[in-house]
Amino acid sequence: MTEKILVILKENKDFISGEKIAKLLNVSRAAVWKNISKLKNMGYNIISVTNKGYLLVENNFLFNKLEIEKELNTFVLGKNIYFFEEINSTNDYAKKLINSNIEIEEGTLIVADCQTSGKGRLDRKWESNKGDGIFLSLILKPDIELFSIMQVTLLAGICVCKAINSITGLNAKIKWPNDIIINNKKVCGILTEVNAQIDKVSYIILGIGINVNNQKFDVALGDKATSIFLETNKNIERQKIIANLLKEFENNYFKYIKEKDFSIFLDEYKSLCININQVCKLIYHKKEIIGKVIDISPLGEIIFETENEILKIVSGEVSLRSINGNYI
Ligand code: BT5
């Protein structure tokens, strides 16, 4: 009911009485009052005036479960949301849910306003300050083989780029496999973790971190990171990006699961990928190899040409670095 009252308050630009809200929702005035108090505690600025009723002073930057639910227009993804003001890591929480006795629906979404131990790949740290970024994990249950997980990650990269670009007009690109880059700096990272039996996937945890309203970063990151705010000088409501991203991902993910074929997204991936035709250093099994990325295969591997051979490489413990400064 809290959400319904919020919608009514948002739709009314003038005061609306408790009685009218109660009538609209067919509930008691006491129930309205209780839920208005709940909204106030959540940070909504609601003015109450005797004989006039309630007026919501809009604050576009509140970020909570209600605001996310209100924006979402997906059918499956995000139907179940766990929201935290602070958590160690949304991916770790997803793991906890999967290992609990609760039945977890496909598309369950975990979102936090801040992470105390945000993780990157290989236990690297993901800077996750309060109020600035998107930290989310989606629990998926695709009927695919272990090898194909990488393709789900690549697909997510396409969708993050499209969501950022359509909302902001920026030109976000992908650094293979799944760093999202704007003007040579990292704006988003994706961490996919898996729960599998033999070679079949049981669950995928798709963790996505996007820098949205960050005005600065830890010195340790130097100038390797950027945010949408730093690139546009505008603050953006994070829930809008989440909604756009989930809609985009839902369309593509279910298409992918049906066809079990990444090649239908290959042209789009390649058009967003900054590595093609770049000479770079590949860090692979702790070895550094210099070569040129000549293409991306229909399975999503990079095709890497060195002096002596052509390698096909799947994502995993690989890192690509530009040697001519074209990207980080
Ligand atoms: C990633 O790892 O890029 C995956 C990041 C995934 C974060 C999300 S947030 C929600 C979910 N819950 C989690 O706990 N994690 C996921 P990797 O490719 O290993 O990159 C990590 C490197 O990126 C670090 O070593 C830093 O150099 C850099 N980095 C750290 N924080 C950053 C930030 N906020 N913005 C840009 N770069 C960052």
Image (cartoon, rainbow, N blue to C red):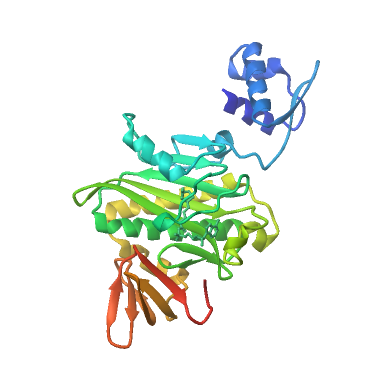
Give percent across and percent down for residue 199. Answer: 20, 52
Residue 47 horizontal side relative to residue 255, left or right: right
Name the residue located 70 percent from the left edge and 17 percent from the top edge.
18
Residue 178 horizontal side relative to residue 31, left or right: left
Give percent across and percent down for residue 282. Answer: 38, 75
Nearest the camera: 52 or 232?
A: 232
Instruction: Decide: is 37 above or below 300.
Output: above
Instruction: Decide: is 46 above or below 72.
Output: above
Nearest the camera: 54 or 190?
A: 190
Residue at the extreme bottom of the image, as rendered: 307
Nearest the camera: 313 or 108?
A: 313
Q: Is residue 108 visible?
A: no
Give percent across and percent down for residue 161. Answer: 50, 60
Quarter where residue 78 is shown: top left
Residue at the extreme left of the image, as rendered: 198
How many marks overall? 0
Give percent across and percent down for residue 45. Answer: 73, 31
Quarter where residue 57 is shown: top right
Q: Is residue 167 visible?
A: yes
Name the residue located 49 percent from the left edge and 42 percent from the top edge.
88
Instruction: Decide: is 118 above or below 36.
Output: below
Name the residue located 65 percent from the left edge and 63 percent from the top edge.
231
Name the residue located 34 percent from the left edge and 29 percent from the top edge.
102
Nearest the camera: 34 or 282?
A: 282
